[in-house]
Amino acid sequence: MKTPKRIQPLVDDGLVDEVKSQLMSGKEASVYVVRCGDEIRCAKVYKEASQRSFKQAVAYREGRKVRNSRRARAMEKGSGFGREQQEKVWQSAEVDALYKLAAAGVRVPEPYGCFDGVLLMELVTDDDGYVAPRLNDVMMSEEQALEDHQLVISYIVKMLCVGLIHGDLSEFNVLVDAYGPVIIDLPQAVDAAANNNAEWMLTRDVNNMRDYYSQFAPALANTEYAKEMWSLFEKGELTSDTELSGEFVEQDTVADIAAIMQEIDAAREEELARKERLKEAQQGVDESKFNWAE
């Protein structure tokens, strides 16, 4: 097929030898199957901001840090240079997340680098060499659903333990090869500690997986993995090896009225004491003035 304009510079630089076909066109990027020497890989071409239909992008960018202060200020002001830098941050977020998650033991496509808005990475395939299907196209037994769901939950835990939340995880962002689920599409990955939307994004990711796999394994329908793992994460008790039960009991905290009243009384007494100290200090100033005048 004809080489897309955005991929042509990679062909000119010898990074890509041939564009074989278009794999898909999504809300933030188009993906192509390419040949790089003797290997078949995929090239993800990110769309310009004006062409993306990805909703609530601001919510996902919250908490992303930029080391260069000039770039950070420009991005905050929304200048032309700032918008350009924001695009670079958006595009590099996925490759950064891929390297980080692979090191943490999460199955993701192997990245080979991002070049001017084009991400080169591993093409995940099935046993016959064809592109691996998305999870939403896969039928499975109850036993397989339970096994794969547990594996995906372990990946989400590993992601959370290195400070990342996918943010858009669903059966459409998971591929399935001979070894099981592979997590894909990570440009919107959020910082679990710095993003105010982190908890509900994690909950949505986990519950999307629960709802899909429960079609094949109904026992999963009532699990509460999201609440369980977030509670442990907030307390600093979540590790990549934590064994989750899928059960979570809400803590109904009964207000201790006596303790609250004690705090109010203590605060009132402290305020009275503060005023008394100010009064005494002022009297001391007045007396010193009087003595000086004499």
Image (tube, rainbow, N blue to C red):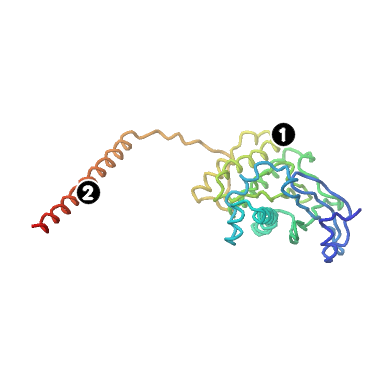
Q: Disc 2 or disc 1, which is closer to the eye?
A: 2
The image shows residue 130, relative to residue 114, as above or below, that is: above
Front residue of 85 and 290: 290
| CA distance separating discs 2 and 1 | 69 Å
Query: Which residue does the numbered mark 1 point to in the structure image?
Result: 215
Residue 154: horizontal and vertical position, in percent? 64, 49
Asked if residue 35 lies left or right of residue 146, the reply is right
Label annotation for residue 278: 2
Work out which residue is located at the far left of the displayed protein and give it: 294
Left or right: 227 as drawn, with respect to 51: left
Who's the residue at 79% across and 38% down the image? 139
Residue farthest toward the front in the current orientation of the protein: 293
Most distant residue in the bottom direction? 13
Residue 250 is marked as none
Whether 166 is drawn above or below 117: the answer is above
Apparent side of residue 51 relative to residue 66 in the rendered image (left or right):
right
For the residue pair 220 and 165, the one nearer the viewer reads as 165
Position in image of residue 18 (x %, y %): 88, 59
Q: Residue at x 80, y 49 (%)?
A: 30
Amino acid bearing label 2:
Leu
Residue 214 lies, in percent from the top left, at 69, 35
Query: Which residue corresponds to the image point at 14% horizontal and 55% vertical from the top-left?
Result: 289
Q: Which mark is first along the chain, 1 or 2?
A: 1
Mark 2: few/some/many CA within 10 Å (<14, 14-19, 20+):
few
Nearest the eye: 124 or 146: 124
